[in-house]
Amino acid sequence: MKLSMASRKPLSFHLITLFPEACDAYLSASILGRARTDKKTQVTYQNPRDFVPVPKGKEGKFAYKKVDERPYGGGPGMVMTALPVVRAIEKAIGKKKGKKAVIWFEPGAKAFDNKEADALLTFDDIVLVCGRYEGIDSRAKKIAKTLGTLKTYSVGEAIYTGGEVPALAIVDAVTRRIPGVLGKDDSVEERRIASREIYTRPETVEWKKKKYRVPKVLQTGHHANIDAWKQKK
């Protein structure tokens, strides 16, 4: 899917996270950082703790804003409460016009892939909800449906400590598909013939008296043969 970005505003990513500092270093570096500098994307953070009222009598600089409670029905660990998350989503979206997506992460949900990344390019605002502990009160997800188009994904089959790693993966995958971010559209790997095996200079690398060489076909300049080799690999 190729979309013209000439007349559209920057694609806005909003991360709902208890640890914005854990995300911003990655999203400020390299290609993602340049995309933000070039106004192709923008990133904001909303911390659910900022939407928790301080208990009366416990005001002050070090007042602790609790965002988790024990689960009904028992079970291990703690669960993030619904309203701080919902309020954070609402603050992120505000009264903006345009298409809004709210991304929820759940193990076993639909796997996020390149097709889904292309689909997210059609939105103006993408909110990524990063859960922690044992998860988020399910009522938050039900309310989130009223705030934007809800999409539930899994990113890989592993279980993560929080939703920050999956959120960063999605921001990365979507950003690199915005026209102009990579310089050339062909730089998006799945849009060209790619191989899992790649080589660069020097032609021969020697390690512990054994030589590792670049395949001859890649040195021929014969593009049809090179493409055939890449497809085979």
Image: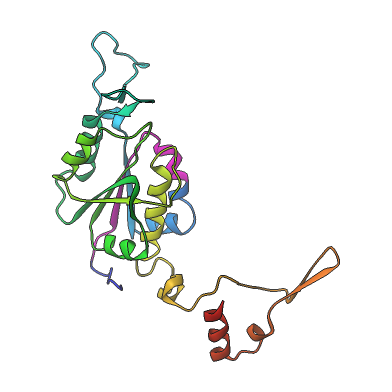
Q: Residue, x 31% and y 61% (percent of image)?
A: 116
Quadrant occupied by the N terminus: bottom left
Most distant residue in the right direction? 209
Quick check: 125 above or below 76?
Answer: below
Residue 108 percent across, percent down from the top left: 35, 49
Looking at the rendering, which quadrant does residue 92 occupy?
top left
Residue 159 percent across, percent down from the top left: 44, 42
Quick check: 36 above or below 221?
Answer: above
> Where does the magenta region start and end?
8-25
Relative horizontal placement of residue 166, taking residue 51 as reference (left or right): right
Relative horizontal placement of residue 87, taking residue 203 as reference (left or right): left
Relative horizontal placement of residue 130, taking residue 99 as reference (left or right): right
Residue 24 percent across, percent down from the top left: 43, 44
Residue 24 falls within the magenta-colored stretch: yes
Quick check: 69 above or below 87?
Answer: above
Quick check: 88 above or below 28?
Answer: above
